[in-house]
Amino acid sequence: MNDNLARVMLHIGGGDPRGGIWFAGIEEATCWQNAEHIAKVVGCSVREEHITYNSGKSAYARDDEPTLGYDFFARIACELSANGCKERTVKGRKWLEYRRTRLFWPNSGVFQINLWPLGKKNTDERPPHYPALFGLANWREYRKCVRRVRFPMIEEFWRKACGSPPVVCFGWSDRSAFAKVFGVKLTELSVRQSRVRVSDRPRVILANHWAARGNQRFIETDAMTVINILKEEWKISLP
């Protein structure tokens, strides 16, 4: 593992990790460009124990980031926020203003992570500059290394430092990895509307990735199912 891979291996996500909910994805949909890009992102991060994460302005969901995941997170978190739904709307959608002014901010109670540290435009892509940038011999060894090094650090931070907050995982195709990190038994999940799977102990929701659905109606249905579980069943609320 070279220095670049070691840095991104320890960098798990961004936002406010305590007192609210976590959103967990498979990997970022953008690429690490070079060593300078890595140093810039990790250099302005908060360090706790063995991990780093973005906080403050470096974690904000900017208007110039058309990330569907952030939209999905904002729809859910806005409905759980005591103040989020009272804010003015943007184009008739209240969650857009929440995304702009509160999502991942300090004291928002909203945090996001990704399982795999090397972002790609799609999960099947293999960026040609990654082997040299990260010292990768092959992708199989990379995944073994992540499972051995990164997964335990995420689990420890989530459980011991943050008190096991509820997690909403997106990407059923990587269910075994989510289960490993958050201690979920896949055989004991209950199935809800839109095939959203739920573990009550620990409180973990596994949903299909929004990009895989390819249909706005399904995305809305998934969001409402997740909101109902968090708000009505688990009584989760956010600032």
Image (cartoon, rainbow, N blue to C red):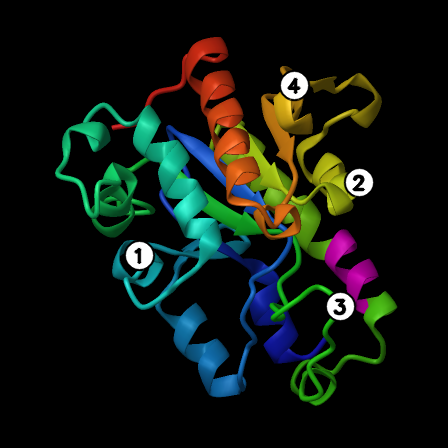
Residue 22 position in % (x across, y down) = 48, 37
Earlier sequence position, callout 2 versus callout 1: 1
Q: Badge 3, how many Cα within 10 Å: few under 14, some, many 20+?
A: few
Residue 176 - label: 2
Q: Is residue 230 left or right of residue 80?
A: right
Judge the density around disc 1: few (<14), some (14-19), many (≥20) Cα neighbours within 10 Å: many
Describe the element under mark 1 as helix, strand or loop.
loop
Assess whether residue 32 is covered by the magenta stretch.
no
* Residue underneath mark 1: 60
The answer to whether the residues at label 2 and label 3 have Cβ atoms under 8 Å apart is no
Label 4's element?
loop
Distance from disc 3 to disc 4, alpha carbons, whole Å, reads 29 Å
| Direction from residue 51 to residue 139 in the image, left or right | right
Is 145 within the magenta?
A: yes
Determine which quarter of the picture holds residue 108: top left
Label 2, label 4: how far apart the Cα atoms are: 19 Å
Q: Nearer the viewer, mark 2 or mark 3?
A: 3
As drawn, the label of residue 124 is 3
Residue drawn at 62 percent across, 63 percent down: 117
| Disc with the residue nearer the chain's start (3 vs 4) | 3
The CA span between labels 2 and 3 is 18 Å
Q: Indicate the amino acid at tag 3.
A: Asp
Observer-side mark, 1 or 3, equals 3
Q: Which residue is mark 4?
A: 192
- Does residue 83 appear in the picture of this structure? yes
Question: The magenta stretch spans which residues?
Answer: 142-148
Tell me if residue 107 can be seen.
no
Which amino acid, by three-letter code, is at mark 1? Tyr
Dominant secondary structure, magenta = helix
